[in-house]
Image (cartoon, coloured by chain):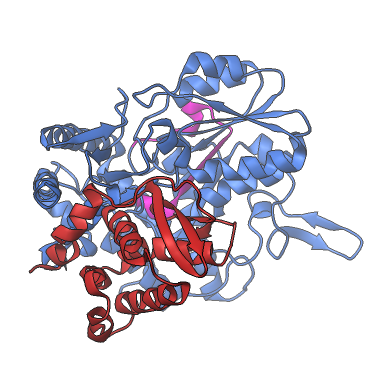
Chain colours: A red, B blue
Amino acid sequence: MSELRELYQQVILDHNRKPRNFGKLDGANRTAEGYNPLCGDQVRVYLDIEAGVIRDIRFEGSGCAISKAAASMMTASLKGKTIGEADQLFGRFHDMLTAAGNGGAAAELGKLAVFSGVCEFPSRIKCATLPWHTVRAALAGKDEPVSTE
Amino acid sequence: MITARDARAAAAPAAALWDVERIRKDFPALHQRVHGKPLVYLDNAATSQKPQAVIDALVAYYSLENSNVHRGVHLLSEKATQAYEEARVRVQRFLNAAEAREIVFVRGATEGINLVAASYGRTWIGAGDEVIISTIEHHSNIVPWQLLCEERGALLRVIPVDDAGELLLDEYARLLGARTKLVAVSHISNALGTVNPVKRMIEMAHRQGVPVLVDGAQAAPHLRVDVRELDCDFYVFSGHKALGPTGIGVLYGRAEWLERMPPYQGGGDMIASVTFEKTTYNALPYKFEAGTPHIAGVIGLGVALDYLSGLGLDRVAAHERELLTYGTATLQAAPGVRIIGTARDKASVLSFIVDGVHAHDVGTILDHAGIAVRAGHHCAMPVMRRFGVPATVRASLAFYNTREELDALGAGLREVREIFG
C-alpha cells in the first residue's frame, strides 16, 4: 500500500464522510474548543462525566479528513471509559504518532491503529492529535481554547 | 579569478524568445524530485525559487568582500559599501523611484509596513482618525494598523469586496473622509490574485490629501512597478518573493514623507552625532537603517531584481497571464473544483476548493505527486470568512512554470477524486 493509501484508509474516509457522535451534546458538563491556526481545523468537544466515567461524548467543528476522522473515532473509543483510561489511550495514541518504532503502541489501540500512517506525514500529526488535546483540556476544566501551536 | 563584481554582472539573462526551459536552468532548486516525482513548484506567492546568479552573489560576497558597510577605511569595507549602495540604485531603478535615498532596506514587506505604522502612524494618526485597508489584505497589512489604532484610539475602516474578489470602489469613496489619515492597500491580493486598481485608488485618496501605502509583496515579481506613475507615498515588497534572499525587503517612501518622519529604530548607522544630551539623526535613507544591515541580502536582492529586469517584467507578466488562462481552464475541467477569486484583472494565483475535500488533504495528496501548493488561510483569514470557506488550496505561478506542470496539477486533482471518491 502506498503511503497515501496508508494515510487515507477506507475507515478514515468513512468517518470523514459520516462522522459519529457529531453535533452538540445537550446536558454536557465539560466542553472545550481546539484550534489549529496553521490550517484552520477547529473542533469543540462535549462530555458528560459522571463519577469519573465518560457517559457520553460528542463533537462538532470543521477540518480536514484526518482531524474529523480522528475526532469521530476518538468519541467512539472514549464512550464508557474512565478518565484514567482515557488518559492512557491518549498517551498510546500520541506515542504511536510521534515515537519511533510504534508497533507496540499501535497493537494496543484497536481500531485507532488506522492512524499509524499519519506519522509518515509530519505536517499532519497535529490534525490527528487536535481532538485528543481538546478532550484533555475539557477534562482539565480549561475554558481557554487549546491550540496546537 | 572571478570577482564578486563579475558574479553580479553575470546575472542578467539573455532573453530573445521566451525560452522557459532555458530560464528553468537558472534555478537549481527546480531540478529535484520530491517523493520520487519531479518537483512542480506552484507555491511562488509564498516564496520564489532563486536563480543561480543570486546564490553565486551571496557566496561571492561572503567569500571575497565580507566586511561592514559605511564605517571601515579598509578596502573590503569600501567594496562592501559600494556593492550595498549599488544595490540601492538597482532597487531605485526597479521601482523607478526619483532618488536612491527614497529606498530603505528592511527585513521584508511586513517590516516596511510596521515602520510606516510606527513612524508615520504615531506622528500623524491620533484619536478619532481613520486608517483604510481592504477586506483582501494579508495579515501583515491588517495587524500593524490594528495595533496602531488601538494605541492611538483611531479607527480601522475596511473596503469591502464583491464575489469575484474585486474591491468596491464606490464603498471606498464613501470611506474616504476628513478623518482618513492613511490608506494601506495591497497591489495584488496574495489569497485571490486580484490586481487592485491602486493608481485610481491613490488618485482618489490624494484628492482628499490622504497618503497611500501600497503593499507590493505579490506585485514586485509579477508586473512592472513604477512608483512615480502610481504616485504612491509608500511602497513595500519582500526580496524573497522576487527571486532574492529571505530577510531582506524594501520600503520606498516619498522623500518629503521620509524627511519628516521620526526614526523607527535607534542604533548605529542611523545617527549623525550622539551625545547624552542630544542625538542628531543621519540623512535619508540611513535614518531608517539602524544597525548593521543585511548586506549580503541587499546585494543578492540587487542581482535578483536585475535578473527580473533582464527578463522584462512585461514579458514575465505576459507569460504568466498565459499560464493563468491555461491553469484556470485546467481547474475548471477538474471534477468538483471551484475557483475562489475571479477578478477581471488577476495575477497568476489560483485559489480553489475541492468539493467535499478539505484543502489540507488536497495539499497532502498533491505533495505526494511532487506538486508544492499552499493549503490554508494564506494569512488572510478575513478573506476566507468573506468567501465562506475555512481554507483554500493555492497554486501560485511564476514565469518559470510550464503548461506541463499545470497538467500535472490537473492529474493530481484527479487523484484527489480517486482517493476521496
In the shown orientation, is residue B89 left or right of residue B374? Answer: right
- Where is the N terminus of chain A found, in terms of image quarters? bottom left
In the shown orientation, is residue A114 left or right of residue B281? Answer: left
Q: x, y percentage for residue B412? A: 12, 50
In the shown orientation, is residue B314 left or right of residue B246? Answer: left
Which sits in the foreground, B59 or B347?
B347
Which sits in the foreground, B55 or B189?
B189
Residue lying furthest right in this view?
B277
Q: x, y percentage for residue B93? A: 44, 42
Question: Who's the residue at 27% across and 73% down the image?
Answer: A119
- Residue A70 sits in quarter: bottom left
B409 drawn magenta: no
Q: Judge whether B167 appears above or below B298 on screen.
A: above
B237 drawn magenta: yes
Which sits in the foreground, B177 or A19?
A19
Which sits in the foreground, B318 or B381?
B381
Question: Who's the residue at 63% across and 57% down the image?
Answer: B289
- Residue B32 sits in quarter: bottom left
- Residue B31 sits in quarter: bottom left
Q: x, y percentage for residue B65? A: 46, 74
Res B101 seen here:
no
Q: Judge whether B421 appears above or below A51 on screen.
A: above
Question: Who's the residue at 39% across and 39% down the image?
Answer: B219
Magenta stretch in the rendered image: B223-242
Q: x, y percentage for residue B141? A: 54, 41
